Amino acid sequence: MVSRYILILFVWYLTTSFQVGNDRSLNFSSNQDNTQSVTSENQTIYSVHTVNLLAEDIYHIILGQNYTAIKITPLDTVKASIRFSSDFDSLNFGAVQTDENIDIPTSFAIFSQPTKNIKLISDKSLAVRIELFYASVLPLRSPQKKNKKSNCEKPITISQTEWRQGLPEPITGRNATVVKHCVIHHSAGNNGDTNYLNTVRNIYLLHTQSNGWDDIGYNFLIAPNGTIFSGRDAQNVADEDNIQGAHFCGKNGGTMGVCLLGNYNNVSPSLDMTSSLVSLLSWKLHKEDLETTDEFPHPNSLSDHLPTITMHRTGCSTQCPGDSTALLIDTIRQKVQTEIDNCKGITKVILPSTVYKQLIYPNPSDGRFYVMIEAAAHISTYRIVNLNGKELFTGFFPFNGRINTDLQNGQYILELYSELTRVSSKKIQIIRP
Ligand SMILES: [Zn+2]
């Protein structure tokens, strides 16, 4: 009998504690409050609405058509926590805020299924912009198992024309870039999402419609099952991996952006995902004749130089690609280097015109070594810096290429200059007997 009363009390608590505000209805299907909407193939694929939310009131939003993703942006400085639910999903956005350094905003959510009904509750009164996205759901492809290719061949990817079906084409106009840095990202959000094709389509809508970019920001996106999606459409300007993207806080020259789909702050990327990442990076570095130990100047580097395999957080103020990815970065570099070493001599490398063949011998050395580089590079001076970029030695490049140093044991960067232009930057190691 007592337990029965407890049960009644519990049910009373549940029903009253979640109905503190007024129920309100918002009709988004009438188009009256739309500030903007975009249509493709007779379907609204993007619409924007401005709403004043009152604290704890429950807003039942009638959409009039299916949508697949939502983004909520506060228009006030109020830090409100917004809960959202659809017929299939329930999510607490936490404190919604605008943060330009986050790849995918925390208040962007992709629905597990298209929905016509959503419900919003905010813990504080504020004005918000609600953006809705609709990417029609394409049939799921089976996981691609052929991504582990030998000889540093290009892994198989799902082309943009395959995954973009039914969505508007990207804006034309592409810049080619000579890639020196592969920048790793994650998409953040939640990890429950397993329809990766759907995720890529909705990120495409987010980047092109909400951000107003020409195309999806990344060059490649990798799903937890190892599937690699081609990102930014090359539009026949250059190879897709040499197209400048939008992912590295406004300094995208010399980079190729790769996004791991999912949130890797607390969860490690799957083996299938890292294996595809290693295949993709091995192919790319080998193609460009880069080593994982190479470092080059980049305006986004916090220490003057950026390594060839780097992370969004190394150049910009962001957590991306998550702490768990950061823990794996050295292992990823080692695996890529092993792949590249295995590939050397197997696949013909076409050198970009600005990279000259060179050899440092021996390396590691006892401080005395030879540097050989193509005469066309016109090397005049050299510089040795530590791994933090601090200059330790500088001098004229000797005619016979022989360099003697009295540096302590350790790793350094040897830079070769033609007049004032840095032509090469290679890691050297000194181990005295
Ligand atoms: Zn990022």
Image: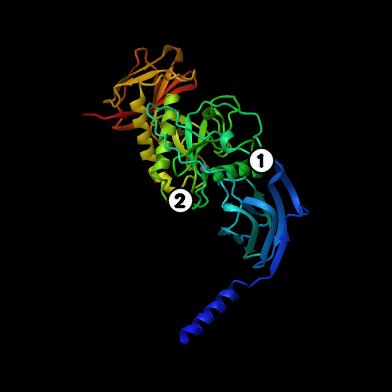
Quadrant housing residue 89: bottom right
Type of residue at label 1? Gly
Is disc 2 placed on a helix, strand or loop?
loop
Using the rendered image of the protein, determine whether residue 333 is visible from the camera's viewpoint: yes
Q: Residue furthest left?
A: 433
- Some atom of ligand 1 lies within 8 Å of the CB belonging to the residue at label 2: no
Tell me the crowding category of disc 2: few under 14, some 14 to 19, or many 20 or more residues within 10 angstroms, Cα based.
some
Q: Nearer the viewer, residue 284 or 390?
A: 284
- Against 18, is 201 above or below? above
CA–CA distance in space, label 1 to label 2? 27 Å
- Some atom of ligand 1 lies within 8 Å of the CB belonging to the residue at label 1: no
Query: Which callout, 1 or 2, points at the residue further toward the start of the chain?
Result: 1
Is disc 1 placed on a helix, strand or loop?
loop
x, y (%) of residue 403? 33, 20
Q: Pick the quarter of the image with the C terminus.
A: top left
Type of residue at label 2? Asn
Q: Which residue is mark 2?
A: 265
Q: Residue at x 63, y 73 (%)?
A: 20
Q: Residue at x 50, y 80 (%)?
A: 7
Q: Which residue is mark 1?
A: 212
